[in-house]
Structure formats: C-alpha cells, structure tokens
Image (tube, rainbow, N blue to C red):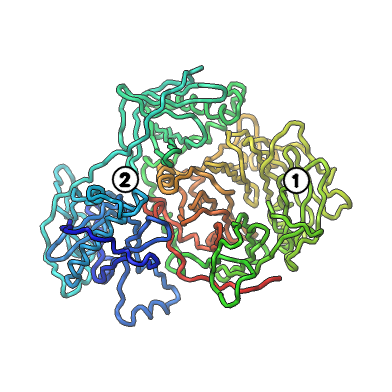
Amino acid sequence: MFVLRNLGKFVFGDSTKQDIIQLDQGQLYIVRPHSVKGYSECIFKDAQATIRRTSTQYHYQLVIQRAFEEGEEQLIDDAEDSDDTRDEKTFLLDESLHMRSAVRDGHAVFAWRDLSGDPGDVYEFVCDTTVQPSSIQTFEVVSMQCQFERKYKRSYETATEKELNQFIFTDSPIPPASPVATPPNTSNAGSPVGASKVPAAPAAPVAPARNTRRPKQPETVTPEVVATVTPKTKSAPEALDVFCTEKAELHLFDLASGTFVLQDSEATAVVSEVGKWQYWLQIEGPEQAHVGIPVIADINPVFNFEYLSFIFNQYDFENGSAFSWLLRFKDYETEERFQEGLMRALWEQLNEQKWAKFKDQDREYVMDAFNDLTMDDAPQEADEDEFYEYENEDEEQLQDDEGSRSEEYDTDEDEDDKHVRNINDDGDENSQLAVGFKHDRSFVVRGNKIGVFKHVGDNGLEFSTTINSVKTPKGKGFVPSKVMLHEGDSSMIMQDETNPHNLYRMDLEYGKVVDDWKIHDDIPVKVFAPEKKFSQMTGEKTFLGLSNNALFRIDPRLSGDKLVDSELKQYVTKNDFSAAATTENGYIAVASNKGDIRLFDRLGINAKTLLPALGEAIDGLDVSKNGRYVLATCKTYLLLIDTLQTGKNEGKLGFQKAFPKDEKPKPRRLTLNPMHVAQMQAETKSPLSFTTAKFNTGVDANETAIITSTGPFVVTWNLKRALAGKRDPYQIKRYQEEVKADNFRFGSDKSVVVAFANEVDMVRKQTFSKPSRESISTPVRQLRNRNAIVDSPY
C-alpha cells in the first residue's frame, strides 16, 4: 500500500455533491490468473476512476468510466443501440473487494477482487504517470474511509487509526496486468497440460507513453479465509420427545470469502419436541455447541440428496444478521432419517396437527416439496453461460438501465414545477399495482388516490393523471384495500376493508365510483378474482368471490344481493381461504392460510383435487392460462405445481379429474439459495417476505418467467430452468428501498412494472443480474432523468 503520512480530513466536501474524488487518467484491466478465458484483458484503455456517493447512507461506489476521444461520445449518444453500461463499471466499496494498491514500473495500481468471477480474478486500475501522487494517496484514504462507514454504519470521523488500518490488504499480492502478459509460473508436474496450452487474450493497443516492460511475476497466493462469527449458541430446552439424532459434518457459509467453512467434522444434529407445537434443532460437536434454534419456516430448509447435504438459515434478529449452515451426511439413509425428523417437526409446528395423522401419500407430497436438486455444491450446468446470454440477449439494445420512473402523481402540483417535488407531502405510500390487459396502462393505489401511468414504447412509463379522493356514490371517502381491473379495463372493482359485505365499481373514464354493490348480508367478501384469466379484456360482468369458507359468483346485474345462490359452495369448517386464480377456460384454483390448494372445474361443486398443505399460509396465487401450472406464494418460498397427470388419467389436469391416491403431483418449491438469503439479510436486516408471485401472461404469449419481490429485491425465475431443476434459476435487481408491488407488462416477459413507496418504475428484465455478492450488495443508482409531471385531473 502507499505510505499514508496523514489521514487528514475526509474530502467529502459538499454532501450534495455525488462525486467525492476522481483519478482522471488510467487503464482498466481484468486479470484472471487461473482462467482459460485468457490471463489479462484490457477493458478500457482510457478511463477515469471515481468514488461516488449513493442515496443510501454509508454506501459508496467505485465507478470506472471509459474516457472518450473528442467527438466519440457524441457519435455513441446518437447511436440507436447505445448502452452506457458498456462504458461504465460500478463496484460497491466493501471490504470484501480487498481493495489494495502498489507501485509498478512507476505507475500506481489499484486492484480489487472480481466478486462475480473465479477465485483469484481481479480488476486493476493502472494510473497514468500524469496523475499527481497526492491525488493517489487521497483516493486510497477515501476508499478506506468509505469501507469503514459501510461496515460500521457511522462516520469515518469516529474511526481510530487501527480501525482504518484493517482495510489495508497487504496479504493479497497484485498480479501483473498487461494485454500481452503471461500467467505466473506455476508447477505443472503431474498435469498433462502445461501452462503453454492456456490460451492468451489477444494483444490490445497500449498508449505509447506506457511502459510495457514485463514486471517480475509474483507467486500466486490463496487469500486467507476468515470464518464468520456466529452468535452465542442457546441451550436446548428440555426435550419432551426426540425425533432424530444424526451425525454429520457442519459447515458455515462465510460472506467475505463466499465459501462454506468446515466448523466440525463430528457434529451431532438433534431435532426434538420441547413444548406444545414447539420444536428445536440443536447441533453440537465433541467440544462445543454450534447451533440452537427453534424449528420454524424462516430457517428456509433445503435438502439435496444427490450431494447428501442440508442447508438452512439461522437468524439473529437482535443484530439483524443471518447465517447459512450446511450439514453433510455420510450416506443417503442418514439424511433420510434426519429429513423425516425435521419435516415432522416443521409440519407439526406450522399446522398444529400430529404428523402421524397425516396420510402417507400426503407426507410424500410434503417431503418431495422440500427436496432440491439445485444446490450450490452441485456441478455447474453445461448451459449456465448460455442461460445468462439468453436472458440478456437484448442487453445491447437497452436505452436506459433504470427505465422511466415517475415519483409523484398528485395533481395539485405547481405548474411551474414540472419535476418531482417532496414525495412525502401527502403522508401516504403506494400500496397496490394493477397492470392493464386491454390498454397499456398501470394503476397504482396511494392512500385514497389512484395514479394512472401510460406504457410508452418498449420500456417507458409516463405519468397520465391522478384520480383524487376515492369516494362511495354517497360521498363517503375510503382507502381501497383491494382493486381489480374489469370490463375491458374501463372499470375498477374495489373494496373498503371496513365494509367487507360491499364492493364498489369505479368508472375509469370519469374517475369516480358509480356503483355500490351489496354482495350478501351474511357472507363477507375476502377475495375477488376475474371469471376467466382474460375476462378483463372483454365486457364480462360477472366475477368470483371468496369468504373465509365459501366460493361464489358475483353478478352485478342481479337486483338486491349480487351473490349468485345457485353457484355458492360453502364449507362447514373454516377453511380460511386467502387467494384465488382462474385459467383461460375458467378453471378455478383456491388457496388458504392453512396452506392447502383446491382445484375446481366450475363453481358450486366440490373441488376435483385437494393438494395438502406444506404448512405456511398461502398469500397469493396464479395459474398458467392453460391450467397446467399453479403458482402459490408463501412468505419464504414459492410453490410451483404441475397439474398435468400421467398414468391412469394421462392428459387430464387436476382441475378436470382428481389425482389417484398414489399419483400425487410433485411440487417444486422455489426458494432463494440460503447463501443468497444470508447475504440479503446482511444487507437489509429483514427476513424474506415475498410479494404475490405472477407468471408473465398474454393471449398469444406462453408463460416463460415468474416475478416476485422481497424487501428491496425484485426476483425473476426462468420457468423452463426452474422446472428442469437447474441451479439458481433466478435473477435479481436490488433497489434502494422496499418494493411494494410488481408485475410483468401484459403480453411481455421482458418489461416489469415495479411500485415503491413513492415511485413507479418500468424496467427491462434484461437489466436483472445473476445473484452474486456484488449484485446483492449494490443498489441501482439514482435516477438520471425524471419525467415531467403536469396537472392533469379528471
């Protein structure tokens, strides 16, 4: 590292200024000491390095931007397929980068880990000799102070010299970067392929002033792995019954290194009952206890029998931390016994019912859902790169990474101010999103107002108007708790949660509620859904309604109560229905807070199929248009079920005919990799909580993707890869604030509409990233342009 004679004052200057310090001349390289892609590659031959603020307190970015020759930038801006991401690379300033510096051949060099690459891969910014030494030293100091603030969430001014010195990484040598450099000498004894067989990157042009003499090659050093420090292990409560006791290796996922670190090779895992519907997992070694946690859904359990592993999460809610553990068993039988014990405990805790009373075929259904073939210790799929190339095939055509956002849709905005003003003036937040089917519009509920946004082009969102002060026909104001577009997107059905026996129809052309429908005196409406999947594109008047224990049709054309008595299916027991969805042909899926799913071919009769509960409540439901796939949203996972039958009822859907007792469908539980969950928790301090997941849909479009969100992360699954059991078949996009609602644009799997507390955004799915430490840690940057918002009341 460079000599730091005087740390001095942090050169943050004006806190409203985004860029803090800049090195204006240098070259950016990617160096891959162990990759067959080539040892060294010049990314930008002329570049500048900047340390930049983000809108998140204590978060800073290292930004490397390509420098343009005179006239070149204008030519690129004029090109239709320009993409500014090719001319800029952004890195969150975090200690995991191991940012370090050195002087090589008279040039100052900054290096940091490529967190998305292979072990040992680094980026290097090589400063030109024209850069002043004082600027280089200050740049280094600022980077250390930024890393300190991110780690400790407090000002650098409170840091001691010792605390800052921990960000000096002298134990990680910087490999040489040169377009014509060759890899460091390594021993190839016993290897059939020598170093000369590794293909080198083609030579790139180098500025004439640069000294290209090859420096001495340092010896390759593997970075030291430092294990994550876990909270103090709690003692196990007195056991009333022991479900299983099994031996296994215990590993802990280390966030800094991105690897599982062996903690104990002879650990004992015990699952026991410790109270009424209370269960405990205790893991101890010969010398110490490692884990002591209650068995609840938040542990996000994932079993992988191919690799004899079980991964789960442990939360430290007091400190807002999460830890990902892995148990590796000696054989299949041992893991099977452990799974039986853990799943019995989890199911009984969630359902408050004894496992022994559960039918054998239903137990198998539950166990299948928690088996996983996509664990991180599985070999990489051969088509992994092809998948991400496919997902990003249109990336070069992106015109704006962040799409077009509108942050305020209050129509009383001053005409002199065409841009965004204080978004918190009304004290409300966005809560619901309805994306139009027939017309390119999105509607966002904010308190007792509804914002209307027009879809522009392939990826644009333009504010249209605001419907202010939602009121009943009698003039009573209310806040819509649920909304649904209706009758060719010309109407919106809405509900006031204080009056569950009534629904209201708003005429969207006039922007006012015109009908107050009394549904039934004794049956409240808890959920409502369209008659068929694409009914809102037509003039269809009727739609479905659910109460806690009843399913019925609502016909607004009836006089008096609008519930159709002849198409009412009411259950004696309280099923606690929570969600419903329909297919293109009108088949109906109904889910409950108990976690079970019923499949109907029509109203007024018993369900053709009852799928047992895994345990967690189902908060949302969607169905593919042909009825083959049912998608249920639980708090910590999604459940994807193929309803197409084989064998005795081959070709029939579960909506049409009941599954034979011995031929239950095999559900696929879509979860985030527990290691990614641990990284998310380290960033956001909040556990998983998914918004209602949706398929992309359209009359002429097949379902290819799934979208949901949790906290500030929007997540999309590739349906084909999820069904094939591929590893981590999802991509993410992290924002700086919590996502309130999300959905695909109708007829597309490429554009996504996202609602935040005070903003609405449309983005291309191709801007989502493969989950990694870098993509999880780095929120998208602030808006560069804001749409004008004008006064356009009804």
Classify 10 Å Cα crowding around label 2: few (below 14), some (14-19), many (20 and above): some
Provide residue 302's location: percent of width, then percent of height. 46, 36
- Frontmost residue, 518 versus 220: 518
Say above or below: 335 vs 61. Answer: above
Screen quadrant of the C terminus: bottom right
- Frontmost residue, 359 versus 521: 521
Ranked by sequence position, the earlier of labels 1 and 2 is 2
Whether residue 652 is visible to the viewer of this picture, yes or no, is no
Residue 256: assigned label: 2
Outermost residue toward the top in this view: 240
Outermost residue toward the bottom in this view: 71
Secondary structure found at label 2: loop
Q: Residue at x 64, y 43 (%)?
A: 651
Residue 768: assigned label: none
Could you tell whether 148 is left or right of 308 in the image? left
Say above or below: 458 vs 479. Answer: below
Could you tell whether 421 is left or right of 259 in the image? right
Say above or below: 474 vs 668. Answer: below
Could you tell whether 305 is left or right of 259 in the image? right
Provide residue 543's location: percent of width, then percent of height. 76, 51
- Frontmost residue, 489 versus 538: 489
Provide residue 163's location: percent of width, then percent of height. 26, 48
State the residue position of label 1.
525
